Image (tube, grey):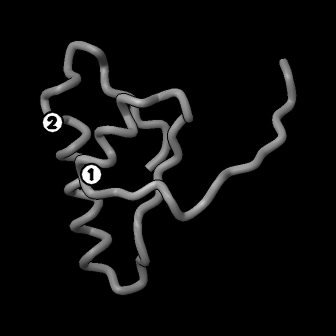
Amino acid sequence: MQSVYVEPAYRGRGVFRKLYEFVRAQAEADVSVMGIRLYVEQHNAKAQRVYQKLGMKSDRYSLFEWMKSF
C-alpha cells in the first residue's frame, strides 16, 4: 500500500479497515508474501492508532533518509 488517503468526510467509517482486511487476506493466501509494511509520518498519531488497532506493530525498523529540499 502506498499513499493511502481517506477523505475527512469518510474517516471513522471503516474505509481503511476494509482496504487493510482485503489486502491482508490476499497476503495470507499467497505463500510468497511475507507481510505488509506501512510507512507513517512520526507526527501522525491518529494513523498510528488505527494501525495498532488492526494489530500492526511498529517496533521492527527505523527509517533513515535524505531528501532534497524544494
Task: Give the number of the disc on residue 14.
Answer: 2
Percent x, y for residue 2? Answer: 49, 44
Question: Image quarter for residue 47?
Answer: top left
Percent x, y for residue 19? Answer: 24, 47
Q: Are marks 2 and 1 in contact (CB under 8 Å)?
A: no
Q: Residue at x 43, y 50 (%)?
A: 1
Total label count?
2
Task: Give the number of the disc on residue 64.
Answer: none
Amino acid at the residue labelled 1: Tyr
Relative to 27, is 9 on the left or the right? left
How packed is label 1: few (under 14 Cα within 10 Å), some, or many (20 or more)? some
- Say whether disc 2 or disc 1 marks the residue closer to the N-terminus: 2
Picture layout, residue 58 above or below residue 8: below
Q: Residue at x 46, y 54 (%)?
A: 58
Relative to 60, is 12 on the left or the right? left
Q: Nearer the viewer, residue 32 or 58?
A: 58
Picture layout, residue 69 above or below residue 60: above
- Reading the image, the residue beneath label 1 is 20
Picture layout, residue 4 above or below residue 34: above
Task: Name the element at disc 1.
Answer: helix
Percent x, y for residue 33? Answer: 41, 77
